[in-house]
Amino acid sequence: MAKKRTAPKTRDAKHANPTPTTDLAGPAWLWPLVAALVAFLVYWPALSLGFVYDDAFRIESLAHLSQSPERALLRPRGLTYAVHLFDYALWGERAFGFHLTNLLLHAAVVVAVYALVRRLPQSRRVALIGALLFAVHPVHVEAVVSFVNRKDMLAMLALALCCMCLQQTTWSQRNRYGGAALCFALALAAKEVAVIGAVPFLAWYLWRHGHKPFHTLPRRSPWFATALIGASAGLTLLAAGVYGILAGDSIRALFGGELNHYGAVIGQVFANVTGQARLLLMPTALSAEYPLVPARNLGAVIIGALLLLAGFWFILTGKTTGPHRLAVAWFLFTWLPTANFIPLSPFFLADRYLYVPSLAFCFGIAWGLEQTLARSRHRRGVMVAIALGLVGFGAYLSRQRLADWGSEQQLWQASLKDVGSTYRAHVMLGSLAMHDNQSRLAEEHFRQALQMRPEVYETQLRLMLVYAKNDRFQQANPLAQSVLAHVPQQPEALRVVAMCALLEQRWSDAVEPFRMLFGLEPNRADVANNLAWLLSAAPQQAIHRYPEAVRYAEKAVALSGGNQPSYRYTLAVALSRSDRLEEAKQQLQAAKALAEQAGNQRLLQEIQRLLNQINP
């Protein structure tokens, strides 16, 4: 009888997940429910929060979008807008409902993470620890608390379902690929940037597991995956180039002049590799926005590039399909698009960008603990304690971070404390101070924001408004000139330029800005009055236009209801210069009565002087 041959040990067998002697007991639905419940309990305080950060702006736009929802559904991220509009229809402007939807979405994602890890295949223990770490990781607070950023949760949920469809061996090939394609389309409709890397990852995953997603290509060589990734990246870059995203002017406008070309963007991506790793490994300094510091350290750029190359080489040239390679693949293929490889955002670091890639980190820790437990059964209690400690620490940090989202003021003050000065933090704090009539504090924040990004005209406009509100038109004028270079008909900037010319007695320079301002805001009585005075009474007679001045003065009196004595006096001056003396006398008498009631002695003297000229 021939001796039965045993299969030789392969590297796959060597690195396969060792199954521990015992696993978590209980029904299959119990442990994902536990993980979802933990996620819900950790974020429970979010239900009492209001609208902060970008939510306050988005909730205003939903009122308009709800009138024509088809416009929202057909735009990019249509699925995200559909969920927004559903919440708005159900809850109106009550923040509780929007936060409840976010918590339910996060809990659903945690369940999907558990199911996805189980299908790798991994034990219940690995799936539970990975799902719990994902549920409480502090880097997820921004995505869970801000309903605008639920796009990351929707994309993650759809992407996890897409992967599970491809792993469903009991389905037919048509149903498997059809379900995966539908889920992937939903992921794209939720957030296109976060899932650009999913196609090459899924193709690579199928290829490594012996499937044949592409029958006519050499599937046994790592260069197949390399070519697939290169083709995907090339097509993406080509599309970005066609739409002008990679043009120097577009990049300068996006980054406020701090980055001038695409090479600088790529250098910034490489330099921030370690920053993203810090957010995952040491999430103790989180922020709604991180400072853009152009990569001037060549060493950081080189280290980041080498780390990325090492990661790609690790997953493409290995002979096994172990969980460690799957984790690295997931992280790289989902993180790189969000790292601004295609410059779509002025931010390179953001908590919400790591919502999808962080699955690799959580799964990697859970798998590592399982390996240690399987090889050292007598240390099982230590491993369990480590897992519970990590989950507890993550829950504690998430709760601490939630407190920062109590109000706009708290959020941006915490941002300054944790990560230092950032452009948007100073802009937001300046706007809040301006709203509270704290002009000095608003000026300080806006000036610091302009030091960081001096070319951003919106910040120049805000600082200009602070100066104008306190009648500091000379200081506001340079800012107004810069604003008008970007927006030639910005009303407040035109007002500043006109008032500054008026105060500096540059009469002819004031006329045209006032004319443009009146054309934009024809119901401004003060603008009409100033125009009438310039065209009838300014010392520079070359600019006098008496009939036109009368029309503007009559408009000012009508808009004010005839209750402003100075406006009636201006009308009287214009009428007298147009030789309409009787009408001028009537306006002077009315102005005199109003000035006497107000106790305006200076105006009374001017009125009397004009009456003496009309009646010598």
Image (cartoon, rainbow, N blue to C red):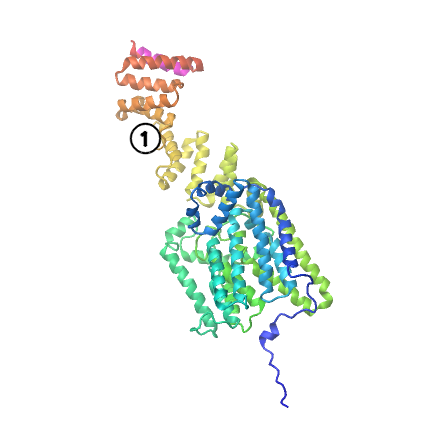
Quarter of the image for residue 240 reads bottom left
Asked if residue 462 lies in the magenta stretch, the reply is no
Q: Is residue 386 above or below residue 469?
A: below
Give the image quarter of residue 214: bottom left
Q: Compared to 550, does 172 lie above or below?
A: below
Q: How many marks?
A: 1
Q: Position of residue 424 (x, y in %)?
A: 49, 44
Task: Report the front residue among 21 and 301.
Answer: 21
Q: Quadrant of the N terminus?
A: bottom right
Residue shown at 45%/30% (left/top)?
Answer: 469
**Label 1: which secondary element:** helix
Query: Which residue is rendered at x = 45% and y = 37% of the image?
Result: 463
The correct choice, above or below, for 297 with respect to 217 in the image is above
The single residue placed furthest to the top in the displayed view is 616
Q: On the rendered structure, is 325 left or right of 474?
A: right
Residue at position x 61%, y 48% from top? 43
The magenta-colored residue range is: 601-612
Q: Is residue 29 left or right of residue 483?
A: right
Q: Is residue 53 visible?
A: no
Residue ranking furthest to the right: 378
135 vs 444, nearest the viewer: 135
- Density class for disc 1 (Cα within 10 Å; few <14, some 14-19, many ≥20) is some
Classify residue 416 by image quadrant: top right
- The quadrant of the image that shows the C terminus is top left
In the rendered structure, the answer to whether residue 584 lies left or right of residue 68 reads left
Q: Position of residue 121 (x, y in %)?
A: 60, 67
Residue 371: x and y, percent? 65, 67
Q: Which residue is mark 1?
A: 515
